[in-house]
Image: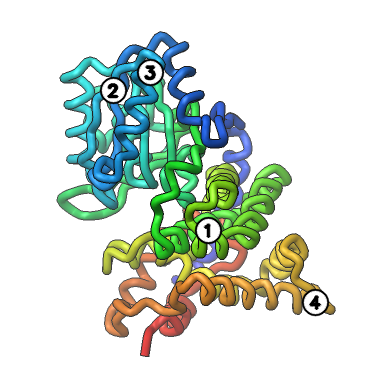
Amino acid sequence: MSKLKRFAHNSLIPIGSLLARFLPDKVPITFVGVDSTRELSESIAQMQIEKVLVVTDSVLVELGLVQKVSECLERAGVASVTYDGVLPDPTFTQVEQGLALLDQHGCQAVLALGGGSPMDASKLISAMATNRVPIEKLEGMMKIKNAPMPLFAMPTTSGTGSEVTLAAVISDPVSHKKKFFTDPKLLPLMVGLDPSLTLGLPPAITAATGMDALTHAIESYISKSATETTRGYAKISVKLVFDNLDRACQDGKNLETRRAMSLASYYGGLAFTRTSVGYVHAIAHTFGSYYKTPHGLANAIALPNVLEFSLPACEAQLAELADDVGIKGESQARKAEEFIAAIRQLMQRVAIPFGLEDLRPQDIPAIAQQALAEAHLNYPVPRYMLQGECETLLHEMLVG
């Protein structure tokens, strides 16, 4: 059975990678810097949009960030209505509630404000506004028939890169399974990277989201679907994280450092939306479904272990990334190993643990099975992983 699965993976993944090269190579109009909230608001007004639905969460309302953006929109002549019901791992129900509010107030566009969860919910709200079908009908690849309602994005974390990706993940509230929606039509029209919106992130969230950005970039770089363009984006992201994550955790009020981390997330998103991800994400998603582990933290914990497993098939790529961040080594193999060691050193400096405290040995077989099933025909990984190999890897993440 394992040989058959490996054969299917090795046969079908290259076809998917080839088809991905024919996706429209679009990048949203992007404003960067402390004036980007104003610039984006004025651009929305120039599109003759009079009212937008701001999709966010209650924490950002309490922090005053939603008011700041709403006032900026108002000064540009755009009214706004706030939907702040998005929770981590948003569900179909939250999307439907947001859509109902959009309809009730006659909004003409959607503005995503927040981290990955508001971004994902916003993408489906805008898609459902013009595709009046049950949300389940939009699940999968290229299922969105009509162009979504105009969608704009302003991230308040620096990790997911969702503001420039073609995908969204929404959970079924009944089965609790994550559902994946992928379509170029889900890409926002415009993005504002305002570093002042990320100043309130505490060090732990800064660290986890920064490691999320790093994971996107590295998994994209070593992907079998990587291209010259995606590798270029990934390299920028990796270097930005290595150069700035420490400082962002130590001094969260530094606007230049926050700007750099916003760009790291942005470029990581541009990279992995074209190449997909790998076993790190498959394991992280499963940790999330089992233990509600924050996604960035789960990615960080899995990253060095998965890279060590993948090393025989991606030594050259990891050595190239080592060169970019100034890691020395007398051979390609040594540089690749030192790059993984440098990731662990970075994790230590920003207080990311090497293991998952919630992980229970009795859950490992099922976690491995679920993660491998997710990755099997979806992720163009450099080295195929079997059940026993995944279980061994997960045992390395046990605490105590």
| Helix, strand or loop at mark 1 | helix
- Read off the residue under disc 2: 80
Q: Amino acid at mark 1?
A: Ala
Residue plotted at (57% across, 35% down): 32
- Read off the residue under disc 4: 329
Q: Which quarter of the rendering shows the C terminus?
A: bottom left
Q: Nearer the viewer, residue 232 or 244?
A: 244
- Read off the residue under disc 1: 248
Residue plotted at (75% across, 60% down): 324
| Helix, strand or loop at mark 4 | loop
Q: Nearer the viewer, residue 33 or 316?
A: 33
On screen, residue 193 above or below 300: above
Q: Amino acid at mark 2?
A: Ser
- Read off the residue under disc 3: 75
On screen, residue 33 above or below 362: above
On screen, residue 337 above or below 103: below
Q: Amino acid at mark 3?
A: Arg
Residue plotted at (28% across, 22% down): 80
Residue 251, image x, y percentages: 51, 60
Among the two numbered marks 2 and 1 on one chain, the one whose residue lies closer to the N terminus: 2
Q: CA distance from mark 1 to mark 4?
A: 28 Å
Question: Quick check: 88 left or right of 228?
Answer: left
In this view, the mark in front (1 or 4): 1
Residue 287, image x, y percentages: 34, 67
Q: Nearer the viewer, residue 386 or 256?
A: 256
Q: CA distance from mark 2 to mark 1?
A: 31 Å
On screen, residue 69 above or below 76: below
Q: Mark 3, residues whose alpha carbon is within 10 Å: few (<14), some, or many (≥20)?
A: some
Dividing the picture into quadrants, the one containing residue 320 is bottom right
Q: Amino acid at mark 4?
A: Gly
Question: Quick check: 373 left or right of 320?
Answer: left
